[in-house]
Amino acid sequence: MELLVYLAGEIHSPWRDDLKKKAESLQLPLVFKGPMEDHDRSDNIGEEIIGNQPNPVQKDEAASAFNNLRTQIWMKKADVVIALFGENYKQWNTAMDASTAISLNKPLILIRPEKLHHPLKELSNKAQVVVETPEQALQALSYVFES
């Protein structure tokens, strides 16, 4: 059995690549999908598809439509969602993706440092598992495959 894992969270650090390498070294049967990690492509995809927009707000709206389409498709197909809340970036998209996973009844593994416990307490309460590191999230998935 193979699991499709949607990796929600900020796109500015290499956490996804690190997690994928660790999963490969553990020989876990996982396939990963997530948001567009090329920030410029993500910001410009609306104009690339439907043309120049009259102002920055319209440009953002156009890009959001295509990014939300991508997220919706992959999240609906996902067997499990891992949402990482780091300490260095605003986490609005992560919160939205975690909430979407919950509303779609997708198993959610929430990664967050202990110091974010209070601001994420309601979301944490809805997740199946809350851990502090990506390695712990992989350990949780590894446990799923044990006999």
Image (cartoon, grey):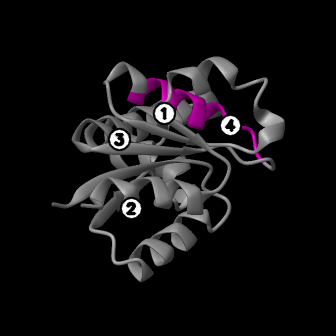
Residue located beneath label 1 in the image: 97
Kind of residue indicated by mark 4: Gln
Q: Which mark is residue 34?
A: none
Q: Are the residues tagged 4 and 1 within 8 Å (C-beta)?
A: no
Tell me, yes or no, if residue 51 can be seen here. no
Residue located beneath label 4 in the image: 91
Residue located beneath label 3 in the image: 50
Label located before the other in sequence (2 or 4):
4
Q: Residue at x 34, y 47 (%)?
A: 49
Kind of residue indicated by mark 1: Asp
| Rendered location of residue 19, percent (x, y) | 52, 67
Residue 72 colored in magenta in the image? no
| Rendered location of residue 16, percent (x, y) | 53, 64
Q: Residue at x 57, y 72 (%)?
A: 18
Residue 99 colored in magenta in the image? yes
3D distance between C-alphas at marks 2 and 3? 42 Å
Label located before the other in sequence (3 or 4):
3
Neighbour class for label 2 at 10 Å: few (<14), some, many (≥20)?
Answer: some
Q: Name the element at disc 4.
A: loop
Which image quadrant is residue 75 in?
top left
Q: Residue at x 53, y 28 (%)?
A: 96
Kind of residue indicated by mark 2: Ser
3D distance between C-alphas at marks 4 and 1? 10 Å
Which range is magenta? 89-101
Q: Which mark is residue 142?
A: 2
Q: Residue at x 39, y 78 (%)?
A: 24
For the N terminus, the quadrant is: bottom left
